[in-house]
Amino acid sequence: LQKLLDHDSTEVRAKALAMLRAYSEVDVSERAQEMVFHTGSEVRVQAIRYLCEKSDQPVVALDRYLSAEKESVRSAALLCAARLSREQPGYRKAIDFTHIFERIWQELRQTEDAEQAEQIKLNAATVIGIAGDAKLNSYLHILLSDDSRKVVEAAVFNAGETQADEFIPVLVSHLSTKSLRNVAREALVRYGDNAVEALSERLKEASLEQATMLAIPRTLAAIKSQKSVNAL
């Protein structure tokens, strides 16, 4: 398994690191530390998680990477933090996502690199979707109005991941946007019955655009529940 850490595929390397966490008798911490700076995002995430879970003070170790000098390491650590928070409730209390996001938005105001700013926003949207921390929803609302189509698309997808009712009206409105229609429909389908009422009410509007008029029944049909069938 350790040999797979040198595999040509970054996906294989990341999976090998994830699997090695289960082997307490094997310690590849030194190799994992090198892989924290790997070019592959998922490899970095898995390397950080491996090192945190091997540490006697996992939260302290995670915080060190969250405060790293390189933005790529900080982003990977944030994704790692989001996954740990979702999977292990103990981490949710220990990780101050609100403080982290305040720092991220400060960085965004200071950066002049548009490409880097977009990448930070994409990562932020993913983290909000994974972490499931309602205190971060205000940041996702900001990303839903971003100038970058890629960022808005990521925000729409991750709004569906949060399952927060406050995003349903925004997602329904995006059914009228051709470039976002599919991802908005998929996000609403993940809400299931919770989205049916909003979709039904929108369908009753007299001024509804034809594209939305067609998209709503398709979305209701895709939910595949008795409530959505009744709405049709």
Image: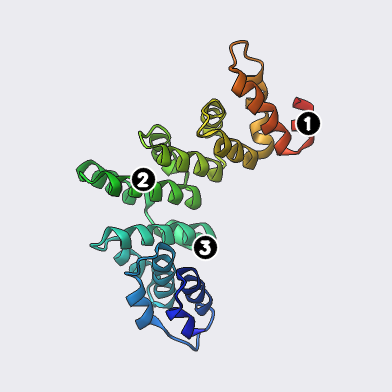
Q: Residue furthest top?
A: 206
Q: Give the mark toward the camera: 2 or 3.
A: 2
Give the residue at x 58% y 37%: 182
Q: Residue 199, percent across and down?
A: 64, 26
User: Looking at the rendering, which quadrant does residue 33 occupy?
Assistant: bottom left
In three-dimensional space, the C-alpha distance between marks 1 and 2, rounded to whole angstroms, equals: 37 Å
Identify the amino acid type marked 3. Answer: Gln
Identify the amino acid type marked 2. Answer: Lys
From the viewer's side, name the closer residue of 81 and 222.
222
Judge left or right: residue 44 versus residue 110.
right
Give the residue at x 42% y 68%: 43
Q: Give above or below for 182 relative to 203.
A: below
Question: Quick check: marks 1 and 2 in contact, CB under 8 Å?
Answer: no
Identify the amino acid type marked 1. Answer: Val
Give the residue at x 43% y 62%: 80
Which mark, by number, is residue 37? none
Q: Residue 210, percent across and down?
A: 61, 18
